[in-house]
Image: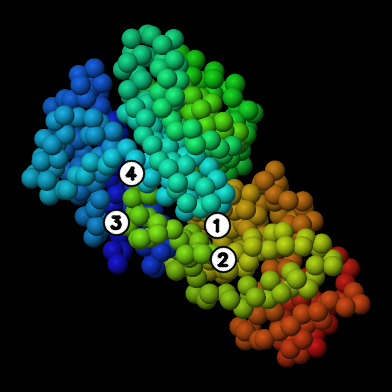
Amino acid sequence: MAKRTAVIDLGSNSMRMAIFERTSRYAFHIIGEFKMKVRLGEGAYEHGGEIAQKSMQKACEALSEFKNIAQNYKCTKIFAMGTSALRDAPNASELISMARKELGINLKVVSGKDEATFGGVAALNLLEPLEEFVTLDIGGGSAELALVSGGKITDAVSLNLGTVRLKELFFDKKNLNAAAPFIKEAFKSLPKNFKSKNLVAIGGSLRAISSAIMSAQDYPLKTVHNFAYKFQNHKNFIENLARASVLELGKFGIKKDRFDTIREGALIFLGAVDAVGAQNIYTSGAGFREGVFLSDILRPTRKFPPNFNPSVRSLQDRFLLDDNKTIVKYAKDLFAALKPLHGLEGRYESELAVAARLHSVAQCLGFYGEHASSAFFVLNALNYGFSHAQKCLVAVIIAQNGKKTSSEFERFKNLLPSEDVVRWLSFILALAKNLDANCAHKKLEFEFINHTLQIYGAKELFMAKENIKKMTKPDTFAICFA
């Protein structure tokens, strides 16, 4: 098993590298991301796709630096993948040969369909679960789309619609009116089965648009991965962005390094939403590079085993001194026993279980403020497979630590269920923790009768009894140790 793997993505505009560290067979996290603008596709779209010598030299220089970084990170695997610009270039073999002979790097040209599939693999495994969706990955030279249904990638296509391509063909020539018809014509070649109300937005341009929307509405989280929104609510913003002048882009919350191609990305995005019939947009911080990595570790299915979450397991592998199985079981059993009081049925039980699993993930930092530090770990590292609402709920359950409310609840309340619900979930976790305060991992059973929570097998849990007496319950009921 390669502990660390580097994936290099050589696109039309930029070269990027992600370094992945595996903590167990399927669990991983990213320990480094790097980017250099190489402009491989610059000037190519009006010269038969040929890569200029200057761009080729810059690409080799970037590859050399990336290789050095990967070696310093002790990566035992390096995947170097070229996409649209390399696919289009009649002189691609020259760059591939230079990379192999001068740097010892095997640069592979990825087909458009494979590129789209890699994006689909990333979205399918690392976003919150969706029954069906279409991915859209806008690059410098092309746009890739994958159709996902029933947990499988059923189709994948690549269109010659990229931000650099549009920039050179239309924007640089001040011929903006011709860009929209060009995009519409390109989407006519999209297979008719590419229809979905859910569109997964991948790639730098689409992430920049999501980030701008988050900033405009003072969104409480900074993580763009899994940010979701209704397209109709922000359609005017995106249309205005596409029509804006370069000097106006700062008003939209767009960073300067995106000024040169963000309007082109917005136009392609609008065309894709129309072609697919999308209503809901899900932003994916994971894309091509993650798809390449996952395709390597998840062979042959390209899917995680059922009920496996790479973020939960990676945090557990790296930081947990105990697997907290007892506390997870207590929390689940208490949730079921106290259902007549909280009335939540099965809602939020899975988030409670994750909170019980990770409540002590920051124990490695020290005892004081452990719950607050653990909540911070969750907010910044529980990225894959959870919606923003779920991630915030898990963090607040931990941070509240059985109290009536918390500053974290106030911070994220627009993403959370009611204060009463959060209080119940936090209380249940705190109660479960107290019942295992002596680390005895007792076999306990719970029953709620006559407005009393009966805890069987707990007679000798003296520390637990003392701690539980101090707890403030979210409702009036008795607790009896039998």
Position of 402 with respect to 283 (left or right) is right
| N-terminal label among 4 and 1 | 4
**134 sits to left or right of 158:** right
Residues at circles 3 and 2 in contact by the CB criterion of under 8 Å: no
Closer to the chain start, of discs 2 and 1, is: 2
Circle 2 SS class = helix
Alpha carbons under labels 2 and 1: distance apart: 8 Å
Image quarter hosting the N terminus:
bottom left
Q: In the figure, 276 relative to 379: above or below?
A: above
* Residue at screen point 16% across, 38% down: 60
Nearest the camera: 108 or 154?
154
Give the Cα separation between the discs numbered 3 and 2: 26 Å
State the SS at label 3.
strand
Q: Which of 403 and 259 is in front in this view?
A: 259
Q: Give x and y (percent) for residue 144.
A: 39, 36
Crowd band around label 2 with a 10 angstrom C-alpha radius: few (<14), some (14–19), many (20+):
many
Q: Which disc number belongs to residue 114?
A: 4
Which numbered disc flags the more N-terminal residue, 4 or 2?
A: 4
Amino acid tagged 2: Leu
- For disc 3, the neighbor class at 10 Å (few under 14, some 14 to 19, many from 20) is many
The residue wearing badge 3 is: 5
* Residue under numbered circle 1: 378
Report the residue at 10% width, 41% height from top: 97
Marker disc for residue 358: 2
First of labels 3, 4 by sequence position:
3
User: Which quadrant holds residue 42?
Assistant: top left
Vertical position of residue 169 compared to residue 421: above or below: above
Q: Which amino acid, mark 1? A: Val
